[in-house]
Amino acid sequence: MLLRYLHGFEPPILHLDLKPANLLITAKLDVKICDFGLSRTQLSVEKEGEMPARTVYKGVEGGTAPYSAPEVLLGKDIDKGADVFAFGVVLCEIYTRKRPWFGVHAARISQLVGFEDKRLPMPEEMRELPKMMALLEACWKLRPVERPPFHKIIEIVDGALSK
């Protein structure tokens, strides 16, 4: 997966606008990511009480609210976890076939996701796939450092779908 590749650079590259409109599917069903207009290379900063030289990017403007992580919506420090959160929203959309937060204004999404720690409902379609449900929950953790890295996401998806 391209995001595993991008996040593997030193410093990592963040896409920051992961959503279905930026995912292209080839005739062979390979997924390609496009629109790197908001992409950033993480900057290294030291934060008190955290691991030294944690790489973050200070608040990004733009993105698409329904797919944005709480830290993005609130203009806080962001890292690879922002892309993982967005992947979780895309995963939810794949299973429900419904646009996330459809009809909800971007400012209200910011309030719900950023300040109230609300998430989309877990897809009923995932009930038969507990590993995928657990993955979705992990992608939506409040703290970005608790969200799984993409190499782990790929292992989980491969394991859950190979049965």
Image (spheres, helix red, strand yellow):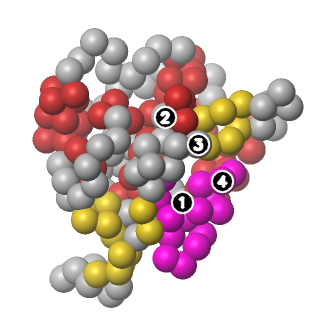
User: Which residue is painted at 57% across and 21% down in the image?
Assistant: 95
For residue 155, side relative to residue 118 (left or right): right
For residue 74, side relative to residue 120 (left or right): left
Q: Earlier in the sequence, mark 2 or mark 1?
A: 2
Return the residue at label 1. 149
Q: Residues within 10 Å of mark 4 (few under 14, many from 20)?
A: few
Indicate the amino acid at tag 1.
Answer: Pro
Q: Nearer the viewer, mark 4 or mark 1?
A: 4
Q: Residues within 10 Å of mark 2 (few under 14, many from 20)?
A: many
Q: Indicate the position of residue 14 as horizontal and vertical percent values.
A: 46, 59
Q: Where does the magenta region start and end?
A: 1-15
Q: Observer-nearest residue: 98 or 24?
A: 24
Q: Observer-nearest residue: 138 or 66?
A: 66
Place residue 23 in its image quadrant: top right
Return the residue at label 4. 2
User: Which residue is painted at 13% across and 41% down in the image?
Assistant: 115
For marks 2 and 1, give the CA distance. 18 Å
Return the residue at label 2. 19
